Image (cartoon, rainbow, N blue to C red):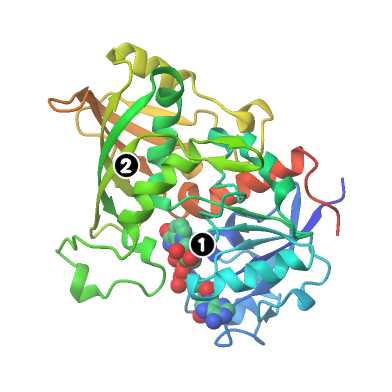
Amino acid sequence: MEKIKVGVLGATGSVGQRFIQLLENHPFFTVSHLAASERSAGQSYGEVMKSKWKISSDIPDYAKGIMISLPKPADTMGVSLVFSGLDSSIAGEVETEYANAGVIVISNSKNHRMVPNVPLLSAEVNADHLEVLKSQSTSGKIITNSNCTIMGVTISLKPLFDKFGLESVMLFSMQAISGAGYPGVPTMDILGNVVPYISGEEDKAEEEPQKCLGTVENGKIKHADFKISAHCNRVPVFDGHTVCVSAKFKKKPSKNDILAAWKEFAGEPQKMKLPLAPEQTIVYREENDRPQPRLDLETGRGMSTVVGRLREDSILDWKWVVLSHNTIRGAAGAALLNAELLYQKGLIPKG
Ligand code: NAP
């Protein structure tokens, strides 16, 4: 089977590196275009990444010799799709240029997330939102991932929202430093410390889940009708966002109802057996002190959402803890799963 040529924009960053790692030997896609800023452009990926590669496995050989260019659609060498891990200061404009040039863009940035006809796609949660692509006017299409903190939260809410309805959600995040990109938060600010503020994060956490759980109406996504209050904190953990969630439901479920809903939850990625789909989307840990980033982050190759500590909430109905890998399930892995979904649905034109 001929593979589809793809590119990675922002290939040198935290998210970009994950793309490079996850795309090694991918059965559907082959990487032929890498782009980053003028700090990296004109040099080979291997050369630039000697000092910037922060993942425990080696830089894949396939990527080392690829020359990095500036993110310009004219230099794409016939790619049909690009994954974008660009800094948000530039992502909006550049992603639109690629879409105008007929390239499908799968973005991790915030810029296009809240546009009503851009899916905020989480493959198990809202594959039906791909319907709105028909109403995008560009020849290429833009699809976004949700924010990394709420990715796991939304996955844990989806089967409960469908069965019991939601009225309100409170969440408290403990977010890893890799979520701030590289070099990110200065060591002297975060070592042995907690920073109770992450710019823009609470706004995203309070509006993105409603879009993810919304419905398609007249070519646009109508947001689900429930309220969220979020507190977002940066903690000295390298990878993995942990979120404490409390929720009030329209119809209060029992503990067993919730556990069964999580256990049974599967979406199109599992039905289609997509390469990166975790076997179990939501994994519940029975132990009192789990999930923990150090112990549970690699569950399902970093693609499962790990949930624990389900107990009654004295103000709302139920509370629990969610852990998800911010650069895998919260970014590059989720984006690649979205691309696999598009591929299997025949939505990627061959370049
Ligand atoms: P990062 O480590 O700072 O990487 C940013 C990338 O953008 C680098 O490749 C950088 O290239 C490139 N870039 C910066 N300015 C540019 C310019 N003017 N022209 C072209 N390229 C430019 O950031 P990150 O953490 O990977 O995040 C990337 C995006 O994903 C952000 O929008 C972020 O909000 C989002 N996101 C991040 C996470 C996470 O856990 N880190 C999770 C979900 C979403 P150089 O190396 O050449 O400077």
Q: Is residue 248 above or below residue 334?
A: above
User: Where is mark 2, residue-wise?
Assistant: 295
Nearest the eye: 210 or 196:
210
Q: Residue at x 39, y 31 (%)?
A: 157
Res 53 seen here: no
Label disc, if present, on residue 343 of the rendered structure: none
Q: CA distance from mark 2 to mark 1?
A: 28 Å
Q: Residue at x 80, y 41 (%)?
A: 346
Looking at the rendered structure, the kind of residue marked 1 is Ser
State the image quarter where residue 297 is shown.
top left
**Which of marks 1 and 2 precedes in the sequence?**
1
Q: Is residue 276 above or below residue 178?
A: above
Nearest the eye: 149 or 67:
149
State the image quarter where residue 242 is shown.
top left
Find numbered disc 2 in the image and state the secondary structure of the residue it sits on: helix
Looking at the rendered structure, the kind of residue marked 2 is Leu
Nearest the eye: 164 or 343:
164
Label disc, if present, on residue 109 of the rendered structure: 1
Q: Where is residue 104 drawn, in percent x and y?
A: 72, 57
